[in-house]
Image (tube, grey):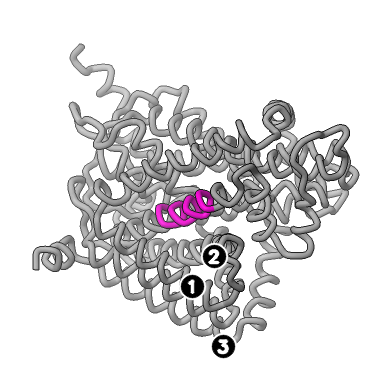
Amino acid sequence: MKVLSKFKEGPKIDKAIYWPSVLITLFLAVYFVFNPEKSLVKLNTVFNYMTNELGWTYIWFTLLAFGSALYLIFGKFGNVILGSPGDKPDFSTFSWIGMIFTASTGSSLLYWGTIEWIYYWQAPPFGAEVGSWEAAEWASAYGMFHWGASAWAMYAVISVAIAYSYHVRKKPILRLSEACRGLLGDRVDGWIGKLIDVFFVFGLIGGVTTSMGLGTPMLTAGICKLTGIAHTRELELIIITVWTLSIGITVFLGLEKGIRKLSDLNIYLAFGVLGFLLVLGGHTVFILNQTTSSVGLMIQEFVHMSFWTDAVGQSKHPQWWTIFYWAWWVVYAPAMGLYIAKISKGRSIKQVVLGSVFWGSLGCWIFFSILGNYSMGLQLSFNNPELFPGRALDVISIFNTSGPAWAVVETIAAAPLGMILLFAFILLAFISMVTGQTTIAFTLAAVTTKELKETEEPARWNSFLWAIILGAISISLLLFNALKPLQTTSIVAAFPLMIVLIIVAISFFKMLKVDKVLEKMQNKPK
């Protein structure tokens, strides 16, 4: 009875946001189920237009976010505390970093970190020859670039904007629309504000299915490798169901007992797997050397990579990769902003921005450096065992014949104690997906809550229900091969969301000016 009571209690939902979000998503999911191919053709047309004709806007937006992050770190507002005088952080720095990092990555980082280099190796940027040493250098550097400071700068700027409204102005509403109040004023209380939040919810749900679409085949392939059972659609459905129930249980336990503890476990397990691969995998020296080279190349070419559109060469590499990634991060930025804002009370603007950008980027780079370069080391040993002695595997052939998921699994299984390490890797992928999607369910519940005080969390039934909705949609779309249209829709939604995020940033700086934050800091008693 006590558990049931906790499940029912909590802040009330905002029906004007909750029901339109749920109904629109369900309507489109049903439409995609019955018209998957037709829907995908239309959506791809819109997507191609946005990435090709409007791709430059994503590039400039990302650079603007990066510049804003630098300004907040080194500028005059860096010491502004996100909270009342005397407020202390709710979480230790280690847990805070872990909660941010695990919330934003999920199993997608394990997937792309292991095999993204293959795409660049086979279709390298800047006119490099396929399979050349130059292609290998770019292959290691580009993944780190896409998952690095530019992406995390988006998260950081939106985080402090929302946190300022929530923790400093004490607005008991944790929504994207509320962060627009500085520019839009009371209009955020009307239909414009509701539209912003509904649109954000829909785009985020599409982004979640993208992560599910990547994580499920990888986890299924790993289980098949470990047990010898066949890879079937039924097995994928069982995995999503167990995932969904695990997410539901975690959100029911709340931020402290559920998400924080699972995030801590995720960090320990991740660095256990990565440490084993680095030290005992057989390619330690290559991983360290290649990582050093790729970090140097990325820093040296950062400006070039950030601005490159290949308008003359027309290789479409920036459109297929960089612009796609920037659009993907735009979709996730509001959710990450709301989540980081909620857990960052008592920290300064500089701490939140620098912590997000530095630790988030570093964590992603570690994954890409070890997983990706270990995978590349296996391939180079296969191609040229005399020059690259050590464990060998034709990863690219597996990738081309059996698919990316199996390339990931076979890469991990090729290590010493491969089956034991693969079990740990699959467990890590499972927990990573749970922590990532738990954050999304928590955020969706927060956005659809009428009022949410600093000391409150969304109603547990609300968070739990969002976890079930996300799982049910993923299962339905997977059954009818209709995942791709909803995934594409989320990326299409990135363009209008980008405009909203610009409004959020402008509103934030306007609020800082209106509140005379600097004057208050200067007049503060020493």
The residue wearing badge 3 is 34
Locate residue 195 relative to residue 358 in the image: left or right. Answer: left
Residue ID at (42%, 75%): 472
The reply to whether the C-beta atoms of the residues labelled 3 and 2 are less than 8 Å apart is no
Label count reads 3
Residue that protrudes farthest toward the bottom in the picture? 34
**Position of residue 187 measured from the top left corner of the image (x, y, whole percent):** 33, 59
Q: Which residues are magenta?
A: 423-435
- Element at badge 2? helix
- Specify whether residue 224 is in view: yes
Which residue is denoted by mark 1 in the rendering?
474
- Report the predominant secondary structure element of the magenta stretch: helix
In front: 410, or 201? 410
Amino acid at dot 3: Phe
441 lies above or below 109: below
The image's mark for residue 216 is 2
Depth check, front residue: 72 or 474: 474
**From where the camera sits, is residue 506 visible?**
no
Mark 3 vs mark 1: in front = 1
The amino acid type, in three-letter code, at marker 1 is Ser
Badge 1 density bin: few <14, some 14–19, many ≥20, Cα 10 Å: many
Front disc: 3 or 2: 2
